[in-house]
Image (cartoon, grey):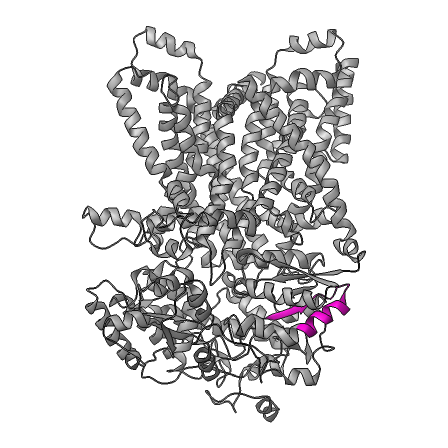
Amino acid sequence: MKKTLWLLTIILTFGLVISACANPEDGGDSSVDGDEASEEDGVVTLDLWNRYPELRAPFDRLIEGFEEEHPDIKINKQDLPLESHEAQFQTALSDNSLPDLFTTAADLQELVEVDAVKDLDEVFTDEVRGEFVEGTWWENGTTLDGTAYVFPFVSPKSGAMVMYYNLDVLEQYGLSEDDIPQTWEEFIEVGNTIYEESGESIYPLAWNNEAWSNDSLVNMMGTAISPNTPWRFDYTEGQPSISTEGKVESAEYLKQLQQENIMDPTSTEVSTIDAEANFAAGNNAFWFSGNWTGTQLYNDHGFENWGVAELPTKDGEPYYYPAARQADGLQVSNNTEHWEEVKVFLEYALDNLHEELYVKSGTGVPAKKDVGGEPPYDQYNDIVALMEELAIPVPKPAQDNLNTVEFERSYNDSLGFAGIGDPVVGYLAGAVDDIEAEIEELDEQAQGTFETTLEEYPDVSSDDYKFPNWEPFTPYTLDDYEELD
Amino acid sequence: MSINPKQSDAFKEISDKKASKVKMSGRAKKRAIWAYIFLLPQVVFFFVLSAYPIIMSYVYSFYNWSGIGPLNDFIGFGNYKQLLSHPRFWQAFENSVYYIIGTTSIGVGVALILAIVLNDARLKGKGIYRTIYFLPVVTTTAIVGIIMNSIFGINGLVNEILTTFNLTNAPIPWLTDGALALLVLIIVGAWKGLGVNMVYWLAGLQSIPNELYESAQLDGAGFWQTLRHITLPLLKPMLAVIVLLSLVTGINAFDLVKTLTNGGPYYQTETLDLFIYNYAFSSEHAGGNTRMGYASATGVLLGIFTFVISLIYGMLSFRKEIKTFLENRKRKRGEES
Amino acid sequence: MISSKSARLVIHFCLIIFGLIWIYPFVWMVLSSLKTNTEFLTSGINPIPEDPQWSNYTNAWENANFAGYFGNTVIFTLATVCIVIILSALTGYALGRIQFPGKKAVMIIVVAIMFIPKGYTVIPLYKIVSDLGLSNSLLGVIVAEASGAHVLFILMFASFFANIPKELEEAAEIDGSGFLRTFFRIMLPLSAPIVATTAIMQFIWTWSSFLIPLVLTVNRPELRTLAVGMQNFVGTYTADYAGMAAAATISLLPVMIIFIIMQRYFIEGVAGAVKN
C-alpha cells in the first residue's frame, strides 16, 4: 500500500515537472506567433481549415502538388471535426484568430459585417468569374454587393437528391435497368417484387430518417406536385410555404413505404453512413441520396455495380432542386499576414483545385467550367448529368434586396424550427400521427412570424419574395431580376 | 472561497470587534495570515477564470447574439420570454427531469446492493469485480453511443435475444420510440454512472466501524438483521451525498444523449444540456443559425433549476435537522421572553 | 458477513453473469476495433471479426495522430490534477484548520458557489485565457480545465484537516517546525487518502473532458487530447467506426490501469472523507 502511495506521489510530481517545463515553451511559441519562426528560413506557412470530411484526402493531394511547385510556401491544413466545427469557428472568430484560409462556415453577410473575410476581387476579376459555371456568383453566397468573398468549389448545379440502385440485387431477382421505377406506384411494385422474391429478407429501400435528409427528400419530391414552392417559400405568392400538398403527400408516401415493408425497418435509427453501407453490401436495392454518394460507394465500399436515376415521383412528373442553396468554398481571413502567398495559392487552386478535389475524386460537380481530369468511376458522368437536369436556379430575394438576409435570420430565429425534416422524423418514428396537421400548424406559425418580422424590417416587404415573372422549372437568370426592376 | 475587497474590510471590522473581546495571540495572528495566503491561489483562480465567464454568460443571455460579432442587440428578457413559450424547451426540461430521476434511482439503488456484496472482505476477486463494474465510468462516451446502437438497435442484440426466445413477434424500436429511447438512455446512463456510486457506497460501508459488526455477530444477528439494523441506518447520511452528486451528474447529461439519440426522434429525448449545445454550436438544430444568447439564457435557467432542486432536496433530506433547529430556536425565544 | 459456502457460490455466480453483461459492450468494442469499416457497419450483432485488422490500431496511433494526442492527454490530465489538488488542499487547510477572521463568510461563499447558476461559459473562458496570452498552448488548456471552484474537494480536505488531533501540530511546533513545514511535512502526507480521491475523480473528469480542450486548441490541433481527437473519425457522409473503436480502446487502457492500482486508495479516501 505504501508503495502505491509512493508511486502516486512520483507520478504526480513527474507530471507537475513535465507540465512546468514543457509549457513555457508551448506558451512562448504560440504567443510569438508560429509564422515568424518559419519565416526565418524563407518559408511561409499558411494555415488552412477544412471542414469537409470528404475532401480531406483530395486536399492533401492538392497541397502536395502546390508545395512541390512552390517550395517557399507551406500549407498547414487542419481537418475540423464535423461535430464541433461550428464551436471551433466561433471561438476563432471571437478573437480574430482565424486561419489564413478556411472553408465556408457561417453566413457571409455576418462575416463581412465583422470584417472577418477578405475581399477577393483582386483574384476574381470579371474574366476569371467568367470561367465559372453560370449562377456561381450569387448574393450572400459567394458575393456580397457584387464583391467576391468566396473561392467557389462546387457548381450551383449540384446537391439534388437522386436514386441509386444496386444492380447485383436487381439482377438477382430478375430485374434490369429497364425496370427502374419512375413513379411512386412503380416503385412500390418493384419493391414488392424484390421483397417477396427474396423471401421477405431484402427490404428494397435503404433510408436514413434524419432531419436533413427527410427535409431534402420531401421538399424535392414535393416540387413534382406543388412546383411553386422550391423549398420554404412560395415565390409566386411571396410568402413562407411550409406546408404544401406536395410535401404532405411525399411525407405520407414515405410512411407508406415504411408500412408496406419497402423501406428497411432500420431506416428509423441509422445514419446516412450505415444506410449507405447496407445498400453497398446488398442488403437493399435502392438508396435515395445526393451527388457525393458515388465516390463513397466506390472508395469506401469498393462497390461498382450500381446505377443512378431520378427519384420516383407521384405520377412520374419532373421534380427539381433550387440551385445554389449552399455556397461551399474557400475564404480568406481579413487578418492574414501573407496575402501575397495566399494569392499564389489561390492562383494555383484556380488551375488545379476543381480537378483534384471534385473530378479526380468523383466527389461532386466542380464550379469551374471545362475542368480536366479522369473521374475514378464510370457513373460520375451520369451523376453530373442528373445534377445538370435537376438543379435549377430559382429566384433569390437577396439578389435584389440584401436586407432580406438579416430579415430572414431574424425570422428563422423567432420561428425556432428549421423546416419540416424534424416533424417527418417524428412521423416515421411514430411520434406524430397526423403529419398534415403537424406541418399545417408550423405553416401558420411561419406565416404569423413572417408578418411580425416584416413589421420590424421596414426595408423588406413581402414583394421581395414575389417574382411574377418566374416559371418553375425555367432557370431564373440575372436578366429576369433586371426585368423585374 | 472568495473575498472581495469590500468584504475583507467587513471582515476586518468584525475581527477588530472580536479582537477587543478576545485578544488574538501572536501565533493566532500569524496563522490567520497564513490562512489568507493559502486561500489566495484559489481566490485568484476563481476570480480570473470562473467569475468572469459566468458573469459574461449572464450578459449574453440578454442579447440577441449569434456568437459571431459584437454584442449590439440588447433585447432584455426577450430570450427568456421566447424560451418559456417554446414547447421544445419544456420538452427538454421534462426529459431532463425523467432522466435525472431515472438514473439516480437505478444508479444509486443497484450500486448499493453491489457495494454491500463487494464489501465482503472474504470475497475472492473483489478487485476484479470492482474494476469490471467501474469500467463504464471511464469509457469515452463517443464510442458508448455506437456500441449501444448495436445492442439496442432494431437488429441489435436485445431484439435478437427477444425474438429467439419468442418473447416478442416484431423487433422493438428501442431507440426510435420516444418513450423507449428515453428508457434506454436512462439504463445506459445508469450503467455508465453506477461504478462511481458503487465506490461512494463502498466508502460509506468502510467508514462503519468493524466493532459494530463484531458485537452484532456476538449477539447472534444474521446477515439480514445486521443489514437492516446497523448497515442501512448508518449509511443514511451517505445517501444524501450520493443522491445529490447523482442529481448533478444527471442534470449535466449531454454527451451520452448526443451520441446515443442526439435528442431524436423529433426532440423527444433532448435534454436541457443538449438543447443548450444545439443552440450554441449546431446551427442545423437551432433553426438555421447558432444563437449564443438564447443558449446562455437556457444555461441560466438550467442553473436556477439545479439550484431549486438542490434546495428542495436539501430541505427534504435535512427535514429533521431543520425542524429541531427551529424548535430549539422557538424554545430559546420562549425562555428569553 | 455471509458464511455458508453455497451462498458464496451463488454470489459469485451472480457477479459473474451480471459482470459479463456489464462488460459485453467492451468486448464488443475491442473485437469491433479489429473489423474493417464495412464489416463493422454490416455485420450486425456478430462481434467476431472475419480477418483481424490490426492496422486499425497502427492507423489510429500513427495516421490519426493518437500518439501525439496520448502524450498531450497525459500531460494535460496530470497537470490539471496537480493544480486542483494543490488549490483544494491549501484552501481546505485554511478552512479546516485555522481560525481566522471571516472564516464563516468564506465557508458560506464556498458552498454557495456550488449552486451558482452557470450559463454557457466556454467562449468567455476562451477569451480570458487568450487575454492572458495562453490560448493555443497546453498551459492554457490546463489552466482553463483547472478553473472553477472545486467545492467538493475543498470540503473533503477541510473536514479531514479539521479532524487531525491538535497535539500532532503542537508537537511539531515545539520541535521548531514552522507553519509551512508543518503543512508540507506532516499535514499533507497525512491527507494522502483525500489526495488520492481528488486525484482519481479529477483524473476521470479531465481525461474525458471535451469542450474545453477543443475550444482552447483551435489553432493548434497538434495539442488536442484523445477525447477531442476521437471526433475526427466521424463525418456527415463518412465515418471510420472501426478506427474509432481502436482509438477508444487505446484511450481506455491507462485509465483502467490507474483504477486497478488505485481503487483501494480511492475507496479509502472517500471513506476517510465520509468518516469525518
Res. B48 visible in picture: yes
Residue occupying image coordinates x 72% and y 78%? A121
B50 relative position to A276: left or right? right
In reply to whether residue A342 is colored magenta, the answer given is: yes
What x and y, as percent, mark residue B123? Answer: 36, 20
Location of residue C150 (image quadrant): top right
Say which quadrant the C terminus of chain A sits in.
bottom right
In reply to whether residue A299 is colored magenta, the answer given is: no
Q: How many marks?
A: 0
Residues in magenta, as a range: A329-348
Res. B253 visible in picture: no
What x and y, as percent, mark residue A248? Answer: 36, 74
From the viewer's side, name the closer residue of B262 and B65: B262
Residue C183 to residue B105: above or below? above
What x and y, as percent, mark residue A70? Answer: 72, 67
Q: Residue furthest right?
A: A40
Location of residue C181 (image quadrant): top right
From the viewer's side, name the closer residue of C98 and A349: A349
Location of residue B243 (image quadrant): top left
Residue B107 to residue B161: above or below? above
Residue occupying image coordinates x 42% and y 61%? A273
A312 relative position to A83: left or right? left
Residue B56 to residue A351: above or below? above
Q: Residue furthest bottom?
A: A483
What x and y, as percent, mark residue A155? Answer: 55, 78
From the viewer's side, name the closer residue of B212 and C263: C263
Residue occupying image coordinates x 30% and y 25%? C12
C130 relative position to B117: left or right? right
C14 relative position to B255: left or right? left
From the viewer's side, name the closer residue of A105 and A471: A105
